Image (cartoon, grey):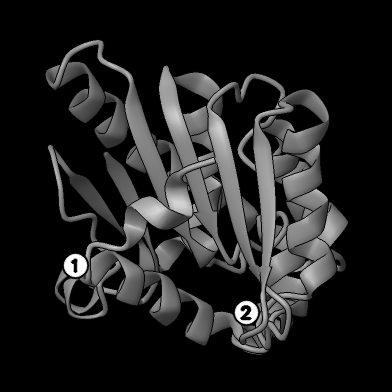
């Protein structure tokens, strides 16, 4: 399984909160801080560099089908991998929309938005145009894996409609997709998911 942790979450912290998968061969990636960048070109360079590492790891472990689990801002990588590799199962927790849209609307990144505007990027559409090909709206048509989306009804970081938008991208092309709305906030939904994983209840939320 490949796991993509939220922004500013170390592997150690991910283990404490149960976000790291417990079984089988697990490759876990921390979200590079520089991904949330006011310069979209720099964000794209970081994304590409990370993809090189991911591709090396997947190649090293052979051509088996893998499961992908991604959290929050880590969903950018989750979508890309699920769209470009042989993935058996894709689990997305509290995804937002595209990177630029998240930066321009998220309560955690107003400073990045301000710096982007000062840099000359005046909208999330301008930002996402620069990183075209590396955002969820460009990485869903080939997702054939069983896909489950856990979205927070009271998400204080991303608007629920953002997560629904990208989840429905997948559902329109992949009927084996389920969208679950959890009556919690952004962080609480991840903690809830981690609780299920930590106490080996994860099968209950994976099965059809």
Measured from the top left, where is residue 147 in percent x and y? 57, 38
- Residue depicted at x 32% and y 50%: 3
- Residue depicted at x 56% and y 26%: 83
- Residue depicted at x 25% and y 10%: 63
Observer able to see residue 110: yes
Measured from the top left, where is residue 120 in percent x and y? 79, 66
Image quarter (top left, top right, bottom left or bottom right) of the C terminus: top right
Dot 1 and dot 2 residues touching (CB under 8 Å): no
Secondary element under disc 2, as helix, strand or loop, is: helix
Image quarter (top left, top right, bottom left or bottom right) of the N terminus: top left
Q: Residues within 10 Å of mark 2 (few under 14, many from 20)?
A: some
The correct choice, above or below, for 187 with respect to 54 in the image is: below
Observer able to see residue 31: no
Position of 37 compared to 160: left or right? left
Position of 183 compared to 86: left or right? right
Q: Residues within 10 Å of mark 1 (few under 14, many from 20)?
A: some
State the residue position of label 2. Answer: 112
Upstream in sequence: badge 1 or badge 2:
1
Position of 101 compared to 156: left or right? right
The correct choice, above or below, for 181 with respect to 168 in the image is: below
State the residue position of label 1. Answer: 11
Point out the frontmost of discs 1 and 2: 1
The quadrant in which residue 150 appears is bottom right
Measured from the top left, where is residue 119 in percent x and y? 71, 70
The correct choice, above or below, for 25 with respect to 16 in the image is: above
The quadrant in which residue 103 appears is bottom right
The quadrant in which residue 172 appears is top right
């Amino acid at each position: 399984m490949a796991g993509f942790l939220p922004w500013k979450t170390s592997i150690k912290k991910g283990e404490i909160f149960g976000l790291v998968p417990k079984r089988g061969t697990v490759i876990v990636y921390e979200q590079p801080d520089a991904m949330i960048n006011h310069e979209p070109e720099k964000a794209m360079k970081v994304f590409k560099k990370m993809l090189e590492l991911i591709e090396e790891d997947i190649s090293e472990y052979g051509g088996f089908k893998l499961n992908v689990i991604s959290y929050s801002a880590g969903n950018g990588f989750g979508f890309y991998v699920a769209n470009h590799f042989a993935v058996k199962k894709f689990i997305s927790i509290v995804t937002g929309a595209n990177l630029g849209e998240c930066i321009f609307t998220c309560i955690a990144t107003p400073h990045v938005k301000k710096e982007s505007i000062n840099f000359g990027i005046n909208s999330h559409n301008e930002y996402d145009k620069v990183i075209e090909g590396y955002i969820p709206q460009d990485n869903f048509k080939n997702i054939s894996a069983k896909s489950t989306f856990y979205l927070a009804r009271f998400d204080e970081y991303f608007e629920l409609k953002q997560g629904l938008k990208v989840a429905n991208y997948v559902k329109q092309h992949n009927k084996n997709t389920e969208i679950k709305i959890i009556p919690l906030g952004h962080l609480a939904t991840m903690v809830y998911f981690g609780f299920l994983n930590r106490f080996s209840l994860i099968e209950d939320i994976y099965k059809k």
